[in-house]
Image (spheres, rainbow, N blue to C red):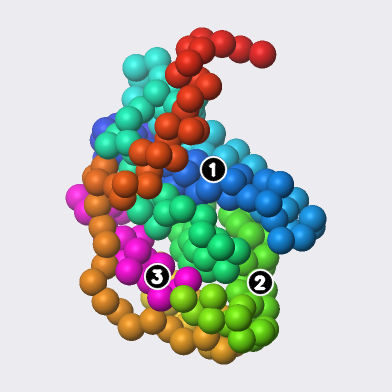
Amino acid sequence: MTETTSSAGNDDVFEYLLRLGDDRLVLGHRLSEWCGHGPILEEDIALANISLDLIGQATLYLGLAGETEGKGRDADSLAYFREGVEFRNLQLVELPKGDFAFTIARQFLFDVFSLHHLEQLQRSANKELAGIASKGYKEVRYHIRHSSEWLQRLGDGTTESHNRAQKALDELWRFTGEMFAGDDVDKQLGAAGVAPDLDEIQTKWRAMVSDVIQRATLSIPSDTFMMAGGRSGRHTEHLGHMLSEMQIVARSHPGAAW
């Protein structure tokens, strides 16, 4: 079992690692659905590469989660042999990929959150977690350049691309509040120096998101009722369908290797 920070319980650290891993596993799978369907060949390759980065990060977080849990589960076990109610990802990342504007807008909103979250997580008192965050931070700096440039291109492009990008932001906005809705796990790990301060991240997220949306000639949606529940296993109907596809091979041939 991995040694964790003394003042942070293993159960809380395990839960936190699942959140980090599940966000990236689910979003990585959604991006992989573009493989062979990208609007242009270079973009097809770019989305596939970002998907692989996210799934690679998920593997590290879920692997450390399995070690922290100490029950013999590895990253593959946690990815392929849990039910939907056991997943701890944000509802934002499990939504169907939609059109290209929807995928780019969703990726941008998550990338900004991930950038500021990982920037602080590099200084976590949990050294293994800090190391994984440091690797991911380098990758997300490239991801956000890609998603922010595309959002500006779409927003400041044709009437159709502008309208589609605005529609995507309007549909996605109510799922962004969950990123900053901390609970007892966040408080306990924050006090132990393991997890970042979500209020600080929200302030930075809001400033960067507002700046890029304005430069894209798009409008910031009004704050409205915010969806929540993913961190405690309450998901949209879309996650179950996605998991049935993602887990089918591993569940059909348990223990198979190649």
**Distance in Å between CA atoms under marks 3 and 1:** 20 Å
Quarter placement of the C terminus: top right
| Element at label 3 | helix
Q: Is residue 232 at all visible to an observer of this figure?
A: yes
Residue 10 in the image, given as x and y percentages of width and height: 30, 32
Contact, CB < 8 Å: mark 2 with mark 1? no
The disc, 2 or 1, on the residue closer to the chain's N-terminal end is 1
The disc, 3 or 1, on the residue closer to the chain's N-terminal end is 1
| Marking on residue 150 | 2
Q: Residue at x 31, y 50 (%)?
A: 236
Camera-nearest residue between 152 and 63: 152
Q: Is residue 233 magenta?
A: no
Camera-nearest residue between 160 and 120: 160
Q: Residue lying furthest front in this view?
A: 160
Camera-nearest residue between 108 and 31: 31
Dominant SS in magenta: helix
Relative placement, left or right, of 83 versus 65 is left
Q: Nearer the viewer, mark 3 or mark 1?
A: 3
Q: Residues within 10 Å of mark 3 (few under 14, many from 20)?
A: some
- Image quarter for residue 199? bottom left
Give, as a three-letter code, the residue at label 3: Glu
The residue singled out by tag 1 in the image is 29
Q: Is residue 170 above or below residue 71?
A: below
Q: Which residues are magenta?
A: 168-190
Give, as a three-letter code, the residue at label 2: Trp
**Distance in Å between CA atoms under marks 3 and 2:** 18 Å
| Element at label 2 | helix
| Marking on residue 171 | 3
